[in-house]
Amino acid sequence: MEKNLAHIALFAALIAVLGLVPKIDLASGVPITAQSLGIMLCGTVLGAKRGALAVLLFLTLTLAGLPLLSGGRGGLGLLASPTVGYIIGFPMAAFTAGLITTHLKTGIGYAATIGAALGGILLLNAVGVLGMSVMLDKSLPEAALLAAPFLVGDSIKAVLAGAITQAIAKMRPEALLSRA
């Protein structure tokens, strides 16, 4: 039990640390950050439940006011911003990435890349676009166009998540809880 809690806290901290990487602001008001890599890794390394719990811990601290999102953002005001869909989608993305990584019976690197892509790109951007559509009063196609610049970076992050997960599986297989 303590090991699970330590992993959950460690990965919540990882997401926060990835927020220190300078963000790139887009016209939509949603920044490109490294934090989505942390979301992907929560699922691919910790598995669905623990990964989602790590993200929920991170979001709880952020919504409580700690400036943990890139650019030092935090607080309940985030729920009324164009990023709300991404915030809501974070735990779902980690859960999906973990579920796919756990159950896709291929090599761990491939499974983690597919899990990260489906959870951290497809699902996360679908929920994010919906949130942008509502908050910016745009149609879904208009909001999707605003989110398009994320796809290249997110694809790189999904491949990185797969490679990092595979490296963990090789170097410390006991630490890879998604396949435990």
Image (tube, rainbow, N blue to C red):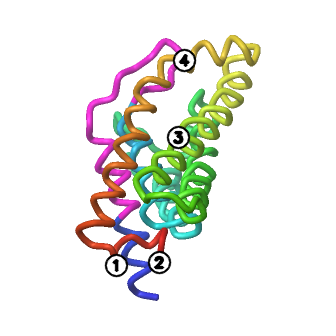
Q: Position of residue 102 (x, y in %)?
A: 55, 65
Residue found at x 34% / y 78%? 174
Nearest to N terminus: mark 3 or mark 4: 3
The residue where tag 2 is placed is 180
Q: Secondary structure at mark 4?
A: loop
Which residue corresponds to the image point at 32% horizontal and 73% vertical from the top-left?
Answer: 173
Pointers 1 and 2 in contact (C-beta within 8 Å): yes
Task: Inspect the magenta stretch and tell me whether residue 18 lies in it.
Answer: yes
Q: Secondary structure at mark 3?
A: helix
The answer to whether 97 appears left or right of 10 in the picture is right
Q: CA distance from mark 2 to mark 3?
A: 21 Å
Secondary structure beneath dot 1 equals helix
From the image, state whether disc 2 or disc 4 is nearer to you. 2
Q: Of the residues under marks 2 and 4, which one precedes in the sequence?
A: 4
Of callouts 2 and 3, which one flags the residue occurring earlier in the amino acid sequence?
3
Contact check, label 3 and label 4, Cβ < 8 Å: no
Q: CA distance from mark 1 to mark 2?
A: 7 Å
Disc 2 residue type (three-letter):
Ala
Query: Which circle, 1 or 4, is nearer the viewer?
Result: 1
The residue beneath circle 4 is 148
Amino acid tagged 4:
Ala
When asked about the image quadrant of residue 170, the answer is: bottom left
